[in-house]
Every structure is written in C-alpha cells, then in structure tokens.
Amino acid sequence: MSIIRKPQAGVTLIELLIGMLVGIIVVAGGMSVYVTSVRGQSENIKLVRLNQDMRAMMDTMERDIRRAGFVTSDPATHFASLQGNPFFDSADPNFAELAVYNGGSCIVYAYNRDEDPDNDGVPDETPPAVDSNERLGFRLNGDAGELEMRSSGDTNEDCDDGEWESVTEPEVEITGLRFTLTSKALNVSSMIVDDDGDGFFNGDDNHNFTCDAGEACNTCTRDGSPDPACLYVRYVTIKLEGQLRDDNDVKQTITEQVRIRNDKFLDAIP
C-alpha cells in the first residue's frame, strides 16, 4: 500500500499581512476603550474632588450666614436684648447685621458671638456691645480666584474693612460668587389685635390663621407715622462657581438658599 504524502503548505505573504492588520485593529480598539475608560474615570475623580471642595465652602457660608442677627439664646429671660438688638440697627451701617456689596459678590453680617462679654458667668440683660470679632462676611477675591472670609472688622459699611483670609483649596479657582437678599415683611401689628372679637386677628381676612397674599398681615410698609410693627423673614441665595486650576474644563456651580433664623423685628412707631 502506497502512502500519499502531501507537501506542507504555509500562508502567503498577503494572508500574513491581512492577519496582522486584523490583529492590529483589534488591539487598537481594545486600547482605545481602555484609554477612554481611564480618561473618564480621571475626569470623574476631578469633578468629585472639585464638588467636595466647593460643597465644603458652601456649607461654611450657610452655617455662618444663617446666624446673622443672633443676640441671645435665652429670649424669655433677656427679652430686653431682643427689643434693643444692636444688630438690627439699620440706621447705622456699623451695626448693619446683613448687607450685600460689590455687585453681590460680597456679604457682611454680624451676630453676638459672646453672651458674657464681662466674663462674670451671667449673660448680659442689656443689648451686647458689637465687638470687632462679631462683624463677619464672605467675599470673592477675583484677582486670586479665592473665596475669602472675614474674621473681624470695625464697620459693616463696605467690604474693604477688616481682616480677610482665604478659605479656598489651592487647586480650586473660584470664578463666580453672588449673594441675593430677599425678604418678606409681615405686619405684626395686625397680627396681635382682634378688634371685633371674632377670634381672628385683624389682618387675617380669610380667617385661617395665616397671612395669605393680599391680606393686611401679609405685607408691612414703614413709610410714615404711625408705622406698624414689622417682622422681616429673610433669605440669602448663594451662587458659587468654580473650576480646577490645572484643568479649566472641570467646572461646577452650586446654588443654595439660606433661611436667616433670626427674623428681624422692628417695633411700631407711634
């Protein structure tokens, strides 16, 4: 029996080149997916880092600004301090407890940081003196791209006075900061009088114990004598914009609204 031997056959040069080309395409595709994934993860890490830094700055502003106008933690005992709150003296800018300057990029405010200034162990019953370390604020330093916080000041008349220091991480550049003040004035005088004895105060026309739009208790104007007692419910909207210094494509904007906890009360002017 004879054995038929077939000659060995390889691949041609063209087949080899085609195989190499297909392999290169597959490897290139895999590398492209890997590079894209790594780049995406890097961008996400940068954005998370920027967001955390800016959130920390926003939280710092929120916690401090909402204290504006605080005068005593014991209003029942020290009611006189509330009536004579020096932080509500709008006639004197040195004592203005909440104001915005520089086109909205700076806010100054004040509150009582020490209820016992004479260190006798008893909070003063009279309104406290406004110390330099009780005039605070935040502002944008546009030249340095930093958020700055004021630790002390002699006046709240502008944003140039006092000691300011940066609260911005070195890798973060603050590109925008805006404070917007809004308030709702309630007519307190109409909310404490019931002339007709129907069980509802005079300003509550709908008799639902709330100040609806259009009711007397819903608005309060102090434009002449006699002026009613007014209660101002205040809000501060903060818009903070920033980016990474080494990668300007990574940007973030955070907007928050702060409810000032100490409503501003102005007594009636007879």
Image (cartoon, rainbow, N blue to C red):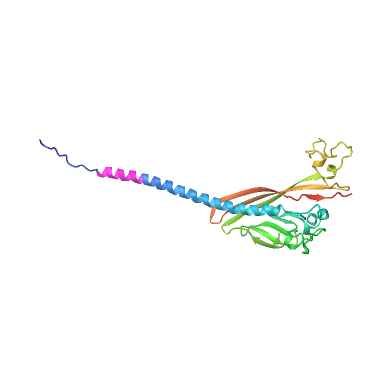
Please identify the quadrant where the N terminus is shown: top left
Residue 20 within the magenta-colored segment of the rendering: yes
- Identified at 55% across, 50% down, the residue is 48
**Residue 118 occupies quadrant:** bottom right
Res. 189 in view: yes
Judge whether 156 appears above or below 35 on screen: below
Q: Is residue 21 left or right of residue 151?
A: left
Q: Is residue 187 left or right of residue 102?
A: right
- Identified at 82% across, 47% down, the residue is 230
Judge whether 118 appears above or below 264 on screen: below
- Identified at 37% across, 44% down, the residue is 26
Q: Which of 25 and 58 lies nearest the eye of the viewer?
A: 58
Res. 103 in view: no
- Percent x, y of residue 217: 81, 41
**Residue 214 occupies quadrant:** top right
- Percent x, y of residue 9: 20, 42
Judge whether 146 appears above or below 269 on screen: below
Q: Which residues are magenta?
A: 12-25
Q: Residue furthest left?
A: 1
